[in-house]
Image: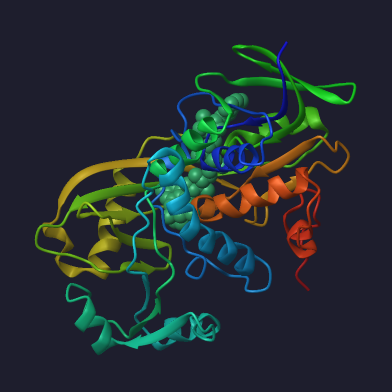
Amino acid sequence: MKNYDVAVIGGGIIGCSIAYHLAKEKLDVAVFESGQVGGKATSAAAGMLGAHSECDDLEVFYPFARNSQLAYQKLQEELVDVCGIDIQLKSGGIYKLAFSEGEKSQLSSLLDLPTVEWHGSAQVLKNETAVNEHINGAAYIRDDIHVLPGLACRAFSKSAQLMGASIFEYTPVLNVQKADSSYFVKTAGGNIGAKYVVIANGVWSSTFFEALGLSHRVIPVKGECLSVSNESISLKHTLFHNHNYIVPRSNGTLVIGATMIENEWDERPTLGGIEELIAAAKELIPAAGDMRIESFWAGLRPSTFDQQPFIGFHPEEKGILFATGHFRNGILLAPGTGQMIRDLILEREVRNDWIDAFKIDRQKQVLV
Ligand code: FAD
Ligand code: GLY
């Protein structure tokens, strides 16, 4: 039986980033993926690195997310050098739109950050001529750029492989058992041993929780998206309003996303979902009705009870780690999660507030 330093369960962007960061440190890593690398939530994502636009918590989430966002700048070149894949980090930033004074005031804490500035309606309409003229203004976030998520995931997995990691596609993990000082991992392709096991299989992670003595759940929040071609309408910025957005990809298509359907396991898009997206797109860009549909799809976001990820060690089993529940931000948080898992395994320093905020046995916050 082959023994690895680390077995990673799940070959989405989280598992592949972890494999990359560990293989770079010369650890012997194996990734086990049920289907194709990046084939689930990762390839459904719009790819926004929304450290500011998706942030409700400036104390802990923001510094973690911002560190991960900035890490992409260096990774872009590094991944091209190692494996030749360009993750298509696209500049332009996000316009987080406000239609009313109330919506503007909801942006106030974001606008206090030095990385965010207010653009009034005249400025927004000058920069983005297709936007609804009833706009009040927008928070302009230059650094909330985006990547092509499927490519980013493949760049991590291919680079990890070139640095010595083993990637097993179509090889689901069936269970994990303790065996003396290491773990016995049973997969559909045979059994292996590992000193550390990282549970990173997205919305399906809870499959392993009960056997590990945990009653936690990872909750699916289905998201549907639509892509359209934009021969007459071009966007320089991603438009973001409530949970909806329109992301201009480098090839000229626009990604319109996304619905939020809690506790839904069916991965097929629905007519109702697509209808909702079209209505939201028309609110942002009144001429959107003329755009041509290219494709539509759906994916399951892995959410948790407080919508923060589970990253860190099992409370008792020091060879089991979790890296799951990244909800709306798995693409953004992939580099930071890979770094944190690497540092925990290598016993390097990790910020205590990140350990506390993301540990699986954290307390539920009770509102008083
Ligand atoms: P996944 O990509 O789902 O990977 C988990 C993998 O585990 C799967 O490939 C699965 O096949 C595998 N697996 C399952 N069970 C087993 C098993 N037993 N053994 C082996 N393998 C197994 N995030 C952003 O940061 N920016 C965005 O713009 C963004 N947009 C989104 C838009 C939509 C519509 C959706 C649905 C999500 C979006 N997200 C976005 C969220 C992001 O996609 C997820 O947080 C992220 O992909 C989670 O990555 P993951 O690797 O944990 O999960
Ligand atoms: N972060 C965008 C989404 O989850 O839809």
Counting from the top left corner in percent of width and height, residue 326 is at: 58, 50
Quarter of the image with the C terminus is bottom right
Tell me the residue at 75%/70% (across/down).
Answer: 367
Counting from the top left corner in percent of width and height, residue 346 is at: 77, 45
Label count reads 0
Tell me the residue at 36%/47% (across/down).
Answer: 86
Q: Does residue 47 appear anywhere in the picture?
A: yes
The one nearer the camera, 111 or 191, is 191
Residue 256 position (above or below residue 42): below
Counting from the top left corner in percent of width and height, residue 289 is at: 15, 59
Residue 347 position (above or below residue 32): below
The one nearer the camera, 328 or 71, is 71
The one nearer the camera, 143 or 39, is 143
Quarter of the image with the N terminus is top right
Dividing the picture into quarters, in which one does residue 195 lie?
A: top right
The one nearer the camera, 216 or 356, is 356
Counting from the top left corner in percent of width and height, residue 170 is at: 50, 19
